[in-house]
Image: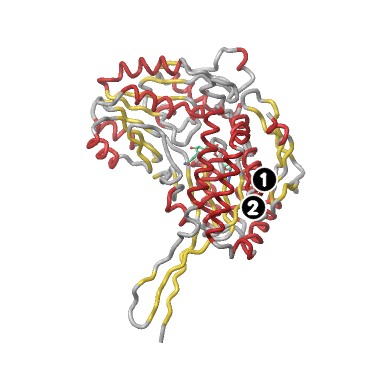
Amino acid sequence: MSAIAETSRQGLFIGGEQVPSHSGRQTEILDPATNRVVATVSAGNREDVGAAVDAARRAFDSAAWREMDPAKRGRLLLAVAQQVRDHADELARLESLNVGKPLKEAKGDMYFVSRGFEYYAGLTDKIQGYTIPVPGARFDYTLREPLGVTAHIAPWNYPLLLACRGIAPALAAGNTVVLKPASLTPLTSLKFCELAQAAGLPPGVLNVVTGPGRELGDALAKHPGVDSVTFTGSTETGKELLRAVSDRVVPATMELGGKNTQIVLPDARLDRALAGILFGAFQNSGQMCWAGSRVLVHKDIAGPLLEKLREKVAALRVGPGLTEGTQMGPLVSRDHLGKVLAAIEEGKEKGAKLLTGGGRPSDPALQEGNFLQPTVFENPPETTQVAREEVFGPVLAVSEFENVDEAVALANQTPYGLSSGLWTQNLGQAHTLARRLQSGMVSVNEYPVTFPQVPFLGWKQSGLGQEQGIDAILFYTHVKNVLMNLE
Ligand code: NAP
Protein backbone atom coordinates (compact mmCIF):
# COMPACT_ATOMS: atom_id res chain seq x y z
CA MET A 1 0.00 0.00 0.00
CA SER A 2 2.98 2.35 -0.26
CA ALA A 3 1.28 4.00 -3.22
CA ILE A 4 -1.34 5.47 -0.88
CA ALA A 5 1.18 7.07 1.42
CA GLU A 6 3.06 8.53 -1.52
CA THR A 7 -0.03 10.21 -2.88
CA SER A 8 -1.43 11.55 0.36
CA ARG A 9 -1.09 15.15 -0.86
CA GLN A 10 -0.64 15.97 -4.51
CA GLY A 11 -0.11 19.17 -6.45
CA LEU A 12 -0.62 19.85 -10.12
CA PHE A 13 2.08 18.68 -12.53
CA ILE A 14 3.24 21.61 -14.64
CA GLY A 15 6.55 22.17 -16.44
CA GLY A 16 8.06 18.98 -15.08
CA GLU A 17 7.31 19.46 -11.41
CA GLN A 18 4.55 19.27 -8.84
CA VAL A 19 3.23 22.74 -8.07
CA PRO A 20 0.46 24.00 -5.77
CA SER A 21 -2.71 25.39 -7.29
CA HIS A 22 -3.31 29.14 -7.51
CA SER A 23 -6.69 28.42 -5.89
CA GLY A 24 -5.13 27.07 -2.69
CA ARG A 25 -8.00 24.56 -2.59
CA GLN A 26 -7.76 20.78 -2.22
CA THR A 27 -10.09 17.95 -3.21
CA GLU A 28 -10.41 14.84 -1.08
CA ILE A 29 -10.05 11.59 -2.99
CA LEU A 30 -12.13 8.73 -1.61
CA ASP A 31 -11.84 4.95 -1.69
CA PRO A 32 -15.22 3.87 -3.17
CA ALA A 33 -15.08 0.66 -1.13
CA THR A 34 -15.17 2.57 2.18
CA ASN A 35 -15.69 6.26 1.33
CA ARG A 36 -12.60 7.05 3.40
CA VAL A 37 -10.16 9.73 2.25
CA VAL A 38 -7.05 8.21 0.65
CA ALA A 39 -5.43 11.35 -0.75
CA THR A 40 -5.91 15.06 -1.25
CA VAL A 41 -5.25 16.66 -4.60
CA SER A 42 -5.06 20.31 -5.64
CA ALA A 43 -8.26 21.74 -7.07
CA GLY A 44 -6.88 23.88 -9.88
CA ASN A 45 -8.45 26.95 -11.47
CA ARG A 46 -8.27 28.93 -14.73
CA GLU A 47 -4.90 30.44 -13.79
CA ASP A 48 -3.48 26.95 -13.41
CA VAL A 49 -4.83 26.01 -16.83
CA GLY A 50 -3.05 29.10 -18.20
CA ALA A 51 0.22 28.06 -16.54
CA ALA A 52 -0.06 24.51 -17.88
CA VAL A 53 -0.81 25.67 -21.43
CA ASP A 54 2.13 28.12 -21.27
CA ALA A 55 4.45 25.33 -20.09
CA ALA A 56 3.22 23.06 -22.87
CA ARG A 57 3.70 25.85 -25.43
CA ARG A 58 7.28 26.54 -24.28
CA ALA A 59 8.05 22.83 -24.52
CA PHE A 60 6.48 22.65 -27.99
CA ASP A 61 8.56 25.59 -29.20
CA SER A 62 11.79 24.30 -27.69
CA ALA A 63 14.36 22.80 -30.02
CA ALA A 64 14.72 19.85 -27.61
CA TRP A 65 11.21 18.66 -28.52
CA ARG A 66 10.41 20.28 -31.84
CA GLU A 67 13.61 19.26 -33.58
CA MET A 68 13.93 15.88 -31.96
CA ASP A 69 14.68 13.05 -34.39
CA PRO A 70 11.32 11.21 -34.68
CA ALA A 71 13.10 7.92 -34.05
CA LYS A 72 14.38 9.32 -30.76
CA ARG A 73 10.83 10.40 -29.90
CA GLY A 74 9.81 6.81 -30.55
CA ARG A 75 12.49 5.52 -28.19
CA LEU A 76 11.26 7.96 -25.53
CA LEU A 77 7.73 6.60 -25.86
CA LEU A 78 9.11 3.07 -25.55
CA ALA A 79 10.86 4.18 -22.36
CA VAL A 80 7.52 5.53 -21.07
CA ALA A 81 5.91 2.17 -21.89
CA GLN A 82 8.69 0.41 -19.99
CA GLN A 83 8.20 2.65 -16.94
CA VAL A 84 4.51 1.72 -16.94
CA ARG A 85 5.41 -1.97 -17.19
CA ASP A 86 7.97 -1.67 -14.40
CA HIS A 87 5.45 0.08 -12.13
CA ALA A 88 2.35 -1.77 -13.35
CA ASP A 89 1.66 -3.30 -9.98
CA GLU A 90 1.83 0.02 -8.12
CA LEU A 91 -0.22 1.82 -10.78
CA ALA A 92 -2.82 -0.96 -10.83
CA ARG A 93 -3.19 -0.87 -7.03
CA LEU A 94 -3.66 2.87 -7.16
CA GLU A 95 -6.26 2.59 -9.94
CA SER A 96 -8.10 -0.19 -8.13
CA LEU A 97 -8.11 1.83 -4.91
CA ASN A 98 -9.33 5.00 -6.60
CA VAL A 99 -11.94 3.56 -9.01
CA GLY A 100 -12.92 0.46 -7.03
CA LYS A 101 -12.31 -1.98 -9.87
CA PRO A 102 -10.85 -5.46 -9.20
CA LEU A 103 -7.05 -5.43 -9.16
CA LYS A 104 -6.92 -7.94 -12.02
CA GLU A 105 -8.87 -5.53 -14.24
CA ALA A 106 -6.65 -2.62 -13.23
CA LYS A 107 -3.58 -4.69 -14.16
CA GLY A 108 -5.17 -5.27 -17.57
CA ASP A 109 -5.62 -1.50 -17.92
CA MET A 110 -1.92 -0.89 -17.24
CA TYR A 111 -0.93 -3.51 -19.79
CA PHE A 112 -3.11 -1.68 -22.32
CA VAL A 113 -1.45 1.65 -21.45
CA SER A 114 2.05 0.28 -22.05
CA ARG A 115 0.96 -1.46 -25.27
CA GLY A 116 -0.53 1.82 -26.51
CA PHE A 117 2.76 3.66 -26.01
CA GLU A 118 4.65 0.83 -27.72
CA TYR A 119 2.27 0.91 -30.67
CA TYR A 120 2.54 4.67 -31.22
CA ALA A 121 6.30 4.62 -30.54
CA GLY A 122 6.57 2.63 -33.77
CA LEU A 123 4.70 5.28 -35.77
CA THR A 124 6.76 8.39 -34.91
CA ASP A 125 8.83 8.14 -38.11
CA LYS A 126 5.98 6.98 -40.34
CA ILE A 127 3.87 10.13 -40.37
CA GLN A 128 4.17 10.80 -44.07
CA GLY A 129 2.91 13.24 -46.67
CA TYR A 130 2.41 12.71 -50.41
CA THR A 131 3.74 14.03 -53.67
CA ILE A 132 0.87 15.00 -55.96
CA PRO A 133 1.02 15.23 -59.77
CA VAL A 134 0.20 18.78 -60.93
CA PRO A 135 0.34 20.39 -64.41
CA GLY A 136 3.45 22.06 -65.86
CA ALA A 137 6.82 22.68 -64.23
CA ARG A 138 5.52 22.45 -60.72
CA PHE A 139 6.08 20.27 -57.71
CA ASP A 140 3.44 19.64 -55.07
CA TYR A 141 3.78 17.78 -51.80
CA THR A 142 2.10 17.57 -48.42
CA LEU A 143 3.58 17.64 -44.95
CA ARG A 144 2.02 16.41 -41.74
CA GLU A 145 2.96 18.74 -38.90
CA PRO A 146 2.07 18.50 -35.19
CA LEU A 147 -0.83 20.68 -34.02
CA GLY A 148 0.94 22.18 -31.00
CA VAL A 149 -0.61 22.03 -27.51
CA THR A 150 -3.24 19.29 -27.25
CA ALA A 151 -5.77 19.25 -24.40
CA HIS A 152 -7.11 15.94 -23.08
CA ILE A 153 -10.12 15.65 -20.79
CA ALA A 154 -10.59 12.18 -19.32
CA PRO A 155 -13.38 10.35 -17.45
CA TRP A 156 -13.20 8.33 -14.23
CA ASN A 157 -13.98 4.81 -15.40
CA TYR A 158 -10.59 3.92 -16.97
CA PRO A 159 -8.65 6.98 -15.80
CA LEU A 160 -5.12 6.30 -17.00
CA LEU A 161 -6.00 4.06 -19.93
CA LEU A 162 -8.38 6.57 -21.51
CA ALA A 163 -6.10 9.54 -20.85
CA CYS A 164 -3.17 7.74 -22.47
CA ARG A 165 -5.30 6.57 -25.40
CA GLY A 166 -5.06 10.15 -26.68
CA ILE A 167 -1.76 11.19 -25.10
CA ALA A 168 0.32 8.45 -26.76
CA PRO A 169 -0.55 9.40 -30.38
CA ALA A 170 -0.42 13.13 -29.54
CA LEU A 171 3.16 12.81 -28.26
CA ALA A 172 4.11 10.42 -31.07
CA ALA A 173 3.11 13.12 -33.59
CA GLY A 174 5.31 15.67 -31.78
CA ASN A 175 2.68 17.62 -29.81
CA THR A 176 2.73 18.59 -26.16
CA VAL A 177 -0.07 17.79 -23.74
CA VAL A 178 -2.25 19.25 -21.00
CA LEU A 179 -4.36 16.56 -19.31
CA LYS A 180 -7.38 17.20 -17.10
CA PRO A 181 -8.31 13.94 -15.35
CA ALA A 182 -11.73 13.38 -13.77
CA SER A 183 -11.98 14.96 -10.32
CA LEU A 184 -12.84 11.62 -8.70
CA THR A 185 -9.83 9.73 -10.12
CA PRO A 186 -6.66 11.77 -10.66
CA LEU A 187 -4.17 9.54 -8.81
CA THR A 188 -2.72 7.38 -11.60
CA SER A 189 -2.45 10.34 -13.98
CA LEU A 190 -0.29 12.20 -11.45
CA LYS A 191 1.87 9.14 -10.83
CA PHE A 192 2.19 8.62 -14.58
CA CYS A 193 3.69 12.13 -14.98
CA GLU A 194 6.54 11.21 -12.65
CA LEU A 195 7.15 8.01 -14.60
CA ALA A 196 7.09 9.78 -17.96
CA GLN A 197 9.57 12.31 -16.61
CA ALA A 198 11.81 9.51 -15.33
CA ALA A 199 11.64 7.99 -18.83
CA GLY A 200 13.19 11.19 -20.18
CA LEU A 201 10.21 13.20 -21.42
CA PRO A 202 11.37 16.84 -21.41
CA PRO A 203 9.72 19.12 -18.81
CA GLY A 204 6.50 20.74 -20.05
CA VAL A 205 5.79 18.10 -22.70
CA LEU A 206 3.21 16.51 -20.39
CA ASN A 207 1.26 18.57 -17.85
CA VAL A 208 -1.67 17.67 -15.60
CA VAL A 209 -4.18 20.06 -14.05
CA THR A 210 -6.64 18.58 -11.59
CA GLY A 211 -9.85 20.31 -10.57
CA PRO A 212 -13.50 20.84 -11.46
CA GLY A 213 -14.31 19.97 -15.06
CA ARG A 214 -16.89 22.68 -15.55
CA GLU A 215 -14.24 25.36 -14.86
CA LEU A 216 -11.06 23.71 -16.16
CA GLY A 217 -12.64 22.00 -19.17
CA ASP A 218 -14.17 25.27 -20.25
CA ALA A 219 -10.87 27.10 -19.65
CA LEU A 220 -9.02 24.58 -21.81
CA ALA A 221 -11.60 24.70 -24.59
CA LYS A 222 -11.48 28.50 -24.71
CA HIS A 223 -7.73 29.03 -24.17
CA PRO A 224 -6.18 30.59 -27.29
CA GLY A 225 -3.04 28.50 -26.76
CA VAL A 226 -4.84 25.15 -27.04
CA ASP A 227 -4.72 23.63 -30.53
CA SER A 228 -7.02 20.61 -30.12
CA VAL A 229 -9.33 18.99 -27.60
CA THR A 230 -9.63 15.26 -27.00
CA PHE A 231 -12.60 14.49 -24.80
CA THR A 232 -13.87 11.22 -23.35
CA GLY A 233 -16.97 11.44 -21.21
CA SER A 234 -20.72 11.75 -21.29
CA THR A 235 -22.65 12.87 -24.36
CA GLU A 236 -24.13 15.82 -22.48
CA THR A 237 -20.73 17.18 -21.41
CA GLY A 238 -19.36 16.48 -24.88
CA LYS A 239 -22.06 18.64 -26.48
CA GLU A 240 -21.35 21.48 -24.03
CA LEU A 241 -17.65 21.25 -24.74
CA LEU A 242 -18.21 21.21 -28.51
CA ARG A 243 -20.12 24.48 -28.21
CA ALA A 244 -17.19 26.04 -26.33
CA VAL A 245 -14.63 24.66 -28.80
CA SER A 246 -16.64 25.76 -31.85
CA ASP A 247 -15.94 29.41 -31.04
CA ARG A 248 -12.25 28.79 -31.56
CA VAL A 249 -12.56 26.38 -34.52
CA VAL A 250 -10.00 23.88 -33.23
CA PRO A 251 -10.17 20.15 -33.97
CA ALA A 252 -11.95 18.04 -31.37
CA THR A 253 -12.36 14.32 -30.82
CA MET A 254 -15.39 13.23 -28.79
CA GLU A 255 -15.66 9.72 -27.34
CA LEU A 256 -19.06 9.74 -25.65
CA GLY A 257 -21.69 7.50 -24.11
CA GLY A 258 -23.33 4.36 -25.42
CA LYS A 259 -26.20 1.91 -25.04
CA ASN A 260 -24.80 -1.21 -26.58
CA THR A 261 -26.74 -4.24 -27.72
CA GLN A 262 -25.58 -7.82 -27.95
CA ILE A 263 -27.67 -10.07 -30.21
CA VAL A 264 -27.66 -13.79 -29.41
CA LEU A 265 -28.82 -15.87 -32.38
CA PRO A 266 -30.28 -19.37 -31.97
CA ASP A 267 -27.10 -21.10 -33.21
CA ALA A 268 -24.81 -19.25 -30.74
CA ARG A 269 -22.50 -21.22 -28.47
CA LEU A 270 -24.27 -20.49 -25.20
CA ASP A 271 -21.25 -21.03 -22.93
CA ARG A 272 -19.22 -18.46 -24.85
CA ALA A 273 -22.11 -16.04 -25.13
CA LEU A 274 -22.70 -16.24 -21.38
CA ALA A 275 -19.05 -15.50 -20.63
CA GLY A 276 -19.11 -12.50 -22.98
CA ILE A 277 -22.40 -11.21 -21.58
CA LEU A 278 -21.04 -11.38 -18.02
CA PHE A 279 -17.80 -9.67 -18.98
CA GLY A 280 -19.56 -7.06 -21.12
CA ALA A 281 -22.15 -6.14 -18.51
CA PHE A 282 -20.32 -6.40 -15.18
CA GLN A 283 -16.65 -5.65 -15.84
CA ASN A 284 -15.76 -2.45 -13.94
CA SER A 285 -19.24 -2.74 -12.35
CA GLY A 286 -20.75 -1.97 -15.75
CA GLN A 287 -19.19 1.51 -15.72
CA MET A 288 -18.10 1.25 -19.33
CA CYS A 289 -19.07 3.33 -22.33
CA TRP A 290 -19.27 0.14 -24.38
CA ALA A 291 -20.91 -2.00 -21.70
CA GLY A 292 -23.05 -4.66 -23.38
CA SER A 293 -25.92 -3.68 -21.12
CA ARG A 294 -28.69 -4.69 -23.52
CA VAL A 295 -28.98 -8.31 -24.63
CA LEU A 296 -31.45 -9.46 -27.28
CA VAL A 297 -31.77 -13.23 -27.27
CA HIS A 298 -33.69 -15.36 -29.77
CA LYS A 299 -36.85 -16.79 -28.16
CA ASP A 300 -35.79 -20.39 -28.88
CA ILE A 301 -32.80 -20.17 -26.53
CA ALA A 302 -34.00 -17.47 -24.12
CA GLY A 303 -35.08 -19.95 -21.40
CA PRO A 304 -31.73 -21.76 -20.94
CA LEU A 305 -29.74 -18.54 -21.38
CA LEU A 306 -31.71 -16.67 -18.71
CA GLU A 307 -31.52 -19.56 -16.27
CA LYS A 308 -27.73 -19.90 -16.57
CA LEU A 309 -27.28 -16.14 -16.54
CA ARG A 310 -29.25 -15.82 -13.30
CA GLU A 311 -27.04 -18.45 -11.62
CA LYS A 312 -23.79 -16.91 -12.83
CA VAL A 313 -24.70 -13.32 -12.02
CA ALA A 314 -25.99 -14.18 -8.55
CA ALA A 315 -22.69 -15.99 -7.87
CA LEU A 316 -20.46 -13.00 -8.75
CA ARG A 317 -18.30 -12.08 -5.74
CA VAL A 318 -18.84 -8.40 -4.88
CA GLY A 319 -16.21 -6.70 -2.72
CA PRO A 320 -13.38 -4.16 -2.56
CA GLY A 321 -11.26 -4.16 -5.71
CA LEU A 322 -8.09 -4.80 -3.74
CA THR A 323 -9.50 -7.89 -2.00
CA GLU A 324 -8.33 -11.16 -3.51
CA GLY A 325 -11.08 -12.97 -5.39
CA THR A 326 -13.34 -9.94 -5.91
CA GLN A 327 -15.13 -10.15 -9.24
CA MET A 328 -17.07 -6.90 -9.04
CA GLY A 329 -16.12 -3.80 -7.05
CA PRO A 330 -18.15 -0.82 -5.81
CA LEU A 331 -19.45 2.00 -7.99
CA VAL A 332 -17.18 5.00 -8.17
CA SER A 333 -19.12 7.34 -5.85
CA ARG A 334 -22.18 7.62 -3.61
CA ASP A 335 -23.67 10.07 -6.02
CA HIS A 336 -23.29 7.69 -8.95
CA LEU A 337 -24.67 4.79 -6.89
CA GLY A 338 -27.78 6.89 -6.24
CA LYS A 339 -28.28 7.47 -9.99
CA VAL A 340 -27.96 3.76 -10.81
CA LEU A 341 -30.33 2.79 -7.98
CA ALA A 342 -32.85 5.32 -9.32
CA ALA A 343 -32.73 3.67 -12.78
CA ILE A 344 -33.30 0.26 -11.15
CA GLU A 345 -36.28 1.60 -9.18
CA GLU A 346 -37.75 3.12 -12.32
CA GLY A 347 -37.42 -0.26 -14.06
CA LYS A 348 -39.22 -2.00 -11.20
CA GLU A 349 -41.99 0.61 -11.11
CA LYS A 350 -42.60 0.30 -14.85
CA GLY A 351 -43.02 -3.45 -14.54
CA ALA A 352 -39.63 -4.82 -15.61
CA LYS A 353 -39.18 -8.32 -14.19
CA LEU A 354 -36.15 -8.63 -11.94
CA LEU A 355 -34.20 -11.82 -12.67
CA THR A 356 -31.55 -11.20 -9.99
CA GLY A 357 -30.06 -8.38 -7.90
CA GLY A 358 -31.85 -5.06 -7.79
CA GLY A 359 -30.47 -3.49 -4.62
CA ARG A 360 -27.55 -3.08 -2.24
CA PRO A 361 -25.81 -6.25 -0.99
CA SER A 362 -26.75 -7.26 2.56
CA ASP A 363 -23.18 -8.04 3.73
CA PRO A 364 -22.52 -5.67 6.70
CA ALA A 365 -18.88 -5.31 5.60
CA LEU A 366 -20.02 -3.63 2.38
CA GLN A 367 -22.34 -0.97 3.81
CA GLU A 368 -19.80 1.89 3.97
CA GLY A 369 -18.87 1.52 0.31
CA ASN A 370 -20.83 2.15 -2.89
CA PHE A 371 -21.66 -1.49 -3.52
CA LEU A 372 -24.56 -2.69 -5.61
CA GLN A 373 -25.73 -6.17 -6.51
CA PRO A 374 -25.19 -7.16 -10.12
CA THR A 375 -28.67 -6.84 -11.57
CA VAL A 376 -30.52 -8.40 -14.50
CA PHE A 377 -33.96 -7.39 -15.78
CA GLU A 378 -35.98 -9.69 -18.04
CA ASN A 379 -38.03 -8.20 -20.88
CA PRO A 380 -38.12 -4.62 -19.50
CA PRO A 381 -40.59 -2.28 -21.26
CA GLU A 382 -38.88 -0.30 -24.01
CA THR A 383 -39.74 2.91 -22.16
CA THR A 384 -37.45 2.13 -19.19
CA GLN A 385 -34.00 3.62 -18.72
CA VAL A 386 -32.53 0.14 -18.27
CA ALA A 387 -33.76 -0.82 -21.77
CA ARG A 388 -32.98 2.40 -23.63
CA GLU A 389 -30.47 4.57 -21.80
CA GLU A 390 -26.92 4.38 -20.58
CA VAL A 391 -27.20 3.42 -16.89
CA PHE A 392 -23.43 3.09 -16.40
CA GLY A 393 -23.72 0.49 -13.68
CA PRO A 394 -24.02 -3.29 -13.23
CA VAL A 395 -27.48 -3.47 -14.73
CA LEU A 396 -28.30 -5.73 -17.65
CA ALA A 397 -31.56 -5.77 -19.62
CA VAL A 398 -32.37 -8.99 -21.49
CA SER A 399 -35.21 -9.13 -24.03
CA GLU A 400 -36.39 -11.80 -26.44
CA PHE A 401 -36.78 -11.44 -30.20
CA GLU A 402 -38.36 -13.59 -32.89
CA ASN A 403 -36.50 -12.61 -36.06
CA VAL A 404 -33.27 -10.80 -36.89
CA ASP A 405 -34.98 -7.81 -38.50
CA GLU A 406 -36.70 -7.11 -35.21
CA ALA A 407 -33.39 -7.46 -33.33
CA VAL A 408 -31.57 -5.10 -35.71
CA ALA A 409 -34.37 -2.52 -35.46
CA LEU A 410 -34.25 -2.63 -31.65
CA ALA A 411 -30.44 -2.36 -31.61
CA ASN A 412 -30.48 0.60 -34.00
CA GLN A 413 -33.29 2.57 -32.37
CA THR A 414 -30.99 4.10 -29.73
CA PRO A 415 -29.54 7.58 -30.32
CA TYR A 416 -26.13 6.10 -29.49
CA GLY A 417 -23.93 4.08 -31.86
CA LEU A 418 -20.83 2.94 -30.03
CA SER A 419 -20.60 -0.83 -30.03
CA SER A 420 -22.62 -3.98 -30.81
CA GLY A 421 -22.09 -7.67 -30.13
CA LEU A 422 -23.16 -10.68 -32.18
CA TRP A 423 -23.22 -14.29 -31.06
CA THR A 424 -23.61 -16.83 -33.88
CA GLN A 425 -21.70 -19.63 -35.57
CA ASN A 426 -23.03 -18.59 -38.98
CA LEU A 427 -20.27 -16.31 -40.22
CA GLY A 428 -22.21 -15.29 -43.32
CA GLN A 429 -24.99 -14.00 -41.12
CA ALA A 430 -22.46 -12.32 -38.82
CA HIS A 431 -20.92 -10.36 -41.72
CA THR A 432 -24.36 -9.35 -43.02
CA LEU A 433 -25.58 -8.21 -39.61
CA ALA A 434 -22.32 -6.39 -38.86
CA ARG A 435 -23.07 -4.18 -41.87
CA ARG A 436 -26.64 -3.49 -40.75
CA LEU A 437 -25.78 -2.41 -37.20
CA GLN A 438 -25.39 1.34 -36.71
CA SER A 439 -22.35 1.42 -34.44
CA GLY A 440 -18.69 2.29 -34.77
CA MET A 441 -17.63 -1.14 -33.50
CA VAL A 442 -19.05 -4.65 -33.85
CA SER A 443 -17.68 -7.66 -31.94
CA VAL A 444 -18.50 -11.18 -33.07
CA ASN A 445 -18.31 -14.08 -30.59
CA GLU A 446 -16.48 -12.11 -27.90
CA TYR A 447 -17.37 -8.91 -26.10
CA PRO A 448 -15.95 -6.36 -25.51
CA VAL A 449 -12.40 -6.62 -26.76
CA THR A 450 -10.06 -4.02 -28.24
CA PHE A 451 -6.38 -3.44 -28.94
CA PRO A 452 -4.36 -0.22 -29.37
CA GLN A 453 -4.00 -0.93 -33.09
CA VAL A 454 -7.74 -1.19 -33.84
CA PRO A 455 -10.11 1.81 -34.12
CA PHE A 456 -12.27 2.77 -31.15
CA LEU A 457 -15.09 5.09 -32.14
CA GLY A 458 -18.77 5.84 -31.84
CA TRP A 459 -21.37 6.81 -34.42
CA LYS A 460 -24.40 9.04 -33.84
CA GLN A 461 -24.39 10.57 -30.33
CA SER A 462 -21.56 8.28 -29.22
CA GLY A 463 -18.90 10.48 -30.70
CA LEU A 464 -16.89 12.27 -33.33
CA GLY A 465 -13.54 11.14 -34.65
CA GLN A 466 -11.54 8.05 -33.83
CA GLU A 467 -9.25 6.88 -31.05
CA GLN A 468 -6.70 4.06 -31.38
CA GLY A 469 -5.32 2.59 -34.57
CA ILE A 470 -3.11 4.04 -37.24
CA ASP A 471 -5.54 6.81 -38.27
CA ALA A 472 -5.86 8.28 -34.76
CA ILE A 473 -2.37 9.74 -35.03
CA LEU A 474 -3.44 11.82 -38.04
CA PHE A 475 -5.89 13.75 -35.86
CA TYR A 476 -2.87 15.15 -34.04
CA THR A 477 -1.36 16.58 -37.24
CA HIS A 478 -2.12 19.41 -39.66
CA VAL A 479 -1.83 18.79 -43.37
CA LYS A 480 0.26 21.39 -45.13
CA ASN A 481 0.28 21.54 -48.92
CA VAL A 482 3.40 22.96 -50.59
CA LEU A 483 3.13 23.93 -54.27
CA MET A 484 6.32 25.05 -56.06
CA ASN A 485 6.78 26.54 -59.48
CA LEU A 486 10.04 25.12 -60.76
CA GLU A 487 10.62 27.62 -63.60
P1 NAP B 1 -18.31 13.46 -17.61
O1 NAP B 1 -19.10 13.83 -16.43
O2 NAP B 1 -18.76 13.93 -18.94
O3 NAP B 1 -16.82 13.89 -17.31
C1 NAP B 1 -15.76 13.61 -18.18
C2 NAP B 1 -14.67 14.63 -17.98
O4 NAP B 1 -15.15 15.91 -18.37
C3 NAP B 1 -14.20 14.78 -16.53
O5 NAP B 1 -12.83 15.05 -16.51
C4 NAP B 1 -14.99 16.00 -16.08
O6 NAP B 1 -14.39 16.69 -14.99
C5 NAP B 1 -14.96 16.86 -17.31
N1 NAP B 1 -16.03 17.85 -17.39
C6 NAP B 1 -17.16 17.95 -16.64
N2 NAP B 1 -17.88 19.03 -17.03
C7 NAP B 1 -17.20 19.62 -18.03
C8 NAP B 1 -17.45 20.74 -18.86
N3 NAP B 1 -18.54 21.49 -18.74
N4 NAP B 1 -16.53 21.04 -19.81
C9 NAP B 1 -15.44 20.28 -19.98
N5 NAP B 1 -15.16 19.21 -19.22
C10 NAP B 1 -16.03 18.86 -18.27
O7 NAP B 1 -18.21 11.86 -17.75
P2 NAP B 1 -17.85 10.80 -16.62
O8 NAP B 1 -19.02 10.69 -15.72
O9 NAP B 1 -16.51 11.09 -16.05
O10 NAP B 1 -17.69 9.47 -17.49
C11 NAP B 1 -18.76 8.67 -17.83
C12 NAP B 1 -19.20 8.94 -19.27
O11 NAP B 1 -18.09 8.81 -20.14
C13 NAP B 1 -20.21 7.92 -19.75
O12 NAP B 1 -21.23 8.57 -20.47
C14 NAP B 1 -19.39 7.03 -20.67
O13 NAP B 1 -20.13 6.37 -21.66
C15 NAP B 1 -18.42 7.99 -21.25
N6 NAP B 1 -17.24 7.30 -21.75
C16 NAP B 1 -17.04 7.20 -23.10
C17 NAP B 1 -15.95 6.48 -23.59
C18 NAP B 1 -15.71 6.30 -25.07
O14 NAP B 1 -14.60 5.95 -25.46
N7 NAP B 1 -16.70 6.55 -25.92
C19 NAP B 1 -15.07 5.88 -22.70
C20 NAP B 1 -15.31 6.00 -21.34
C21 NAP B 1 -16.39 6.73 -20.86
P3 NAP B 1 -14.91 16.45 -13.48
O15 NAP B 1 -14.62 15.04 -13.18
O16 NAP B 1 -14.10 17.41 -12.72
O17 NAP B 1 -16.38 16.75 -13.49
Q: Secondary structure at mark 2?
A: loop
Vertical order, 124 against 165 (above or below):
below
Picture quarter with the N terminus: top right
- In the picture, the quarter occupied by the C terminus is bottom left
Task: Find residue 369 and name its label.
Answer: none
Quadrant for residue 432, please give it.
top left
Badge 1 local density, few (<14 within 10 Å), some, or many (20+)? some
Please give left or right for residue 134 compared with residue 363 in the image: left
Q: From the viewer's perspective, is the residue at label 2 or at label 1 nearer?
A: 2
- The residue that disc 1 covers is 194
Q: In the figure, is residue 47 to the left or right of 487?
A: right
Circle count: 2
Q: Residues within 10 Å of mark 2 (few under 14, many from 20)?
A: few
Give percent across and percent down for residue 449: 41, 36
Q: Locate residue 395 relative to residue 171 in the image: left or right.
A: left
| Tag 1 secondary structure | helix
**Residue 149's quadrant in the figure?**
bottom right
Whether 265 is drawn above or below 316: the answer is below
Q: Is residue 2 left or right of residue 481?
A: right
Q: Identify which residue is drawn at 71% across, 52% down.
A: 47
Residue labelled with disc 2: 200
The location of residue 393, given as percent across then percent down, is 50, 28
Check the image and tell me how it is coloured: secondary structure
* Nearer to us in this view, 191 or 77: 77
Amino acid identity at mark 2: Gly
- Residue 167 location, x and y as percent? 55, 49
Going from N to C along the chain, the mark reached first, 2 or 1, is: 1
Task: Give how far apart the Cα atoms at labels 2 and 1 are.
Answer: 10 Å
Badge 1 amino acid: Glu
Residue 477 at x, y percent in the picture = 49, 60
Q: Are marks 2 and 1 in contact (CB under 8 Å)?
A: no
Which sits in the foreground, 210 or 6? 6
